[in-house]
Amino acid sequence: MILALLSDIHGNLEALNACLKHARNAGAKRFAFLGDLVGYGADPAAVVEIMMHQAAEGAIVLRGNHDDAVANPASYMNDSAKDAIDWARQALSEKERVFLARLPLIAKEDSAFFVHASANAPERWNYVDSPAAARTCAEASGCPYTFCGHVHHQMLYFQRREGAMSAFRPVPGSAIPMRGHRRWVAVVGSVGQPRDRTPAAAYALFDLSRGEITFHRVPYDQLAAAQKIRAAGLPASLARRVELGI
């Protein structure tokens, strides 16, 4: 079975639809959405509606820090992020806000652990952005495979024989064997707001039967998504991020 792993959609409907289409064409039968469904982008309600449908169909759908901030405003966010959350709060229906508030922080199935940030204190939104942070995350999850987002970059960490973790930057489209005798932490990237100077949407596919992960970048109409952000009166910096992948 092929599992699609998507995170940090951030209200970007164009990017989400492009990734869903790409994943289905690649044979994905199951989906896991690793949080930050809203924030930054101009289509929070449409994205949440899709997530509600996906959850009803059996998909894993988790809560990220931006989703959490809809009900619990966060002081640590910068002004642009706060403005986008305030706008999203008004754009979402009560039913959609309740859906976000009730989403779990983690999910665990067989040998896989799913979380938005780190498996270590997931409610603290720690970044898995180094081998040391990946080791802490992997030890907390207790599973061979841990999948997360939050960082907006794609990275794969793997456990060496002595227990320390090493980082590997994946090449999009190339399958990587993930043998179950060691621990792995896959940071799947951002669907709706990549930050590696490539605007194409980022997500990953995990082939459970083969034990392989493939990271993907999917071109989409980022100019249309950026124009929606401007038309909504959201900060112009958020539109530029989508256009340029910064």
Image (cartoon, rainbow, N blue to C red):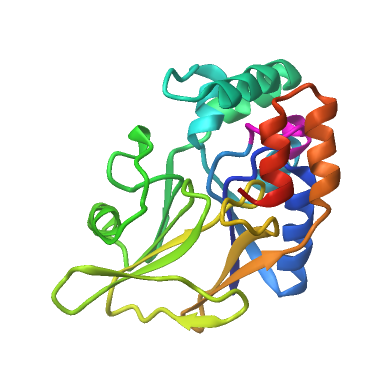
Q: Which residues are magenta?
A: 38-47
Residue shown at 77% from the left, 72% from the top? 25
Residue shown at 75% from the left, 30% from the top? 45
The quadrant in which the N terminus is found is bottom right
Position of residue 2 measured from the top left corner of the image (x, y, whole percent): 60, 72
Question: For this rendering, which residue is in front, 56 or 117?
Answer: 117
Position of residue 29 measured from the top left corner of the image (x, y, whole percent): 67, 67
Q: Is residue 177 above or below residue 113?
A: below
Residue shown at 61% from the left, 52% from the top? 194
Q: Is residue 62 left or right of residue 114?
A: right
Residue extending furthest toward the left: 162
Can you see residue 57? no
Can you see residue 125? yes
Q: Is residue 210 left or right of residue 4?
A: left
Q: Main secondary structure of the magenta part?
A: loop
- To which quarter of the image does residue 173 belong? bottom right
Position of residue 27 measured from the top left corner of the image (x, y, whole percent): 71, 74
In the image, is residue 151 part of the stretch drawn in magenta?
no
- Tag count: 0
Q: Is residue 104 above or below residue 187?
A: above
Q: Is residue 196 left or right of residue 200?
A: left
Position of residue 162 measured from the top left corner of the image (x, y, whole percent): 13, 75
Question: For this rendering, which residue is in front, 89 or 103?
Answer: 89
Q: Is residue 66 above or below residue 200?
A: above
Residue shown at 62% from the left, 39% from the top? 37
- To which quarter of the image does residue 189 belong? bottom right
Question: For this rendering, which residue is in front, 140 or 108?
Answer: 140
